[in-house]
Image (cartoon, rainbow, N blue to C red):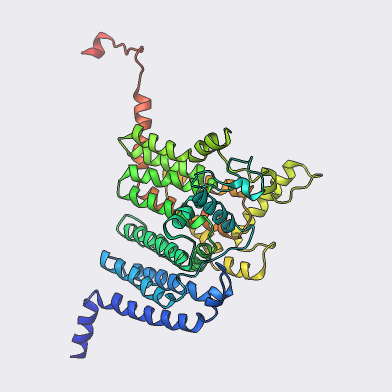
Amino acid sequence: MKRGIKDSIFRNKSFVPVSAFFLFALCGILGIQLTIRPLPNNSFALGKEMISMFIPFLMSMTYLIVLCVIKSLTFRTLLLVFSLFVVLVLPFKGVLGDPIEYHKKDDAYIYSLTAKNMVETQTLWCGDGLLTGNENVRHFTRQPGYRYYVAMWILLFGTEKRFFQFINMGIYIVCMALLLHKSLYTNLDTRILSRTLAFLFLSAPFVAKMILMGIAEWLALVLFMLGTIFFVEKRYTVSAVFFALAPFMRQNLLIVSALFFIILLLHSNKKILLSLWYFMLILLPLWHNIYYGHALRFFADYGRTEKLMLFSHPDSSMFLTTIKNVLYHLSLYSGIDYRSDLHTNLVAVTFIPFGTLLVVYMGKRLGGILRYAFWCLISFAVAPTLFFGWAYYPRFEFVNLFVAVLSYIILCNSRLPGLCRGIIKNTMTWTGPCERTTHSRSQRY
């Protein structure tokens, strides 16, 4: 009798997901009640007093990964993931309306300041001239896109509040759930998938930190995730829109976005329409700078591009400075940054080395042209950050590793080998309009 009950329980596929839902909800609520006390007394977006705000995100991400491991990720259980997040946000109802502030000179402070100016003056001008008090500076000097996302929120709700941070976490979780749902039912290697889930689990605390900090990387990854989801769904026009918007958030992702678009373009029959949409959106910073700044500029220059490079000195050559930057930034993929504090290194070492090994393993699992395409994508994702990326370690390293995961998903769901063989075959057999093939009489008959 007992054996029969046990068998019936495990045959019921909803038992484990529902039981896990209540277990995670109970543990999450308990953890929140133990850590929420300092939160109402602090208005900053991130700090040790906000440790309780990590719990809804971490519990929901862990629950999502557990569902993937037991292969129970369906539309119904996706609703359970989102419901768990909502349930764990409810204990914060007393602080959801509290306004938040950022430390001056942080990226989030700049985005917030310029976003408020856009709403107050009813303009789309970036407002970067306000940072130096020189309103003659009319072009982008900081990353362009995230301020418009913040401005949209302020326009709708009046100011940035705790609720804004939870909404951002919820957006990330929903997109991640949809991405994993699509990945489980495609031709991905199960060993790669299990290691990818481990990487997502280990990096989840850092993702929560980025969202609470209000920096643009998390939204750029969301846009890339949405582009990947629609690529797998073969909805190429929508995919092109999201791939084009990602570099608007972080311009160092421009080249890898363009490569994603080329892969997408090879699969689509609407190449002209896709190209028009993509280039219209990818050039948004240029349109802004031409209209408001009367300058033919695309990239944010931070006032002076040389300031972005480390180890620069008036007496040192640019060649040596470049070499030092490249070697230093490559060493960061070990999970250790000697320029950062102990806490930062402890966070990074939990997932950066694992993610680096995962990317190497992905490259080995691919074969033929897919392997070359994979390493090409990774190289162009990493290259810009070898010279100019250094703040908030390990945000650039994490983004690049995450882009590698998305690259693998895209390539595994592409028809790239067949498309490339077709292109090569057509090139080899084309003789041109003016060339003629002559045959002898015996060959003709």
Quadrant where the C terminus is found in the figure:
top left
Residue 297, x across and y down, in percent: 57, 36
State left or right for residue 320 relative to residue 123.
right
**The residue positioned farthest toward the bottom in the image shown:** 1
Q: Based on the displayed image, in which of its 4 quarters is residue 353 positioned?
A: bottom right
Vertical relation: 197 (above or below) 237:
below
Quadrant where the N terminus is found in the figure:
bottom left
**The residue positioned farthest toward the front in the image shown:** 121
Query: Residue at 58% of width from left, 58% of height from top?
Result: 109
State left or right for residue 7 relative to residue 317.
left
**Res. 72 visible in picture:** no
Residue 366, x across and y down, in percent: 42, 50
Q: Based on the displayed image, in which of its 4 quarters is residue 437 positioned?
A: top left
Query: Residue at 59% of width from left, 49% of height from top?
Result: 385
Query: Residue at 46% of width from left, 55% of height from top?
Result: 219
Residue 367, x across and y down, in percent: 42, 48
Query: Residue at 54% of width from left, 56% of height from top?
Result: 112
In depth, the one of 281 and 195 nearer the eye is 281
Q: Based on the displayed image, in which of its 4 quarters is residue 64 positioned?
A: bottom left
Residue 391, x across and y down, in percent: 63, 57
**Res. 83 visible in picture:** yes
State left or right for residue 25 relative to residue 54.
left
Vertical relation: 100 (above or below) 288:
below
**The residue positioned farthest toward the top in the image shown:** 441
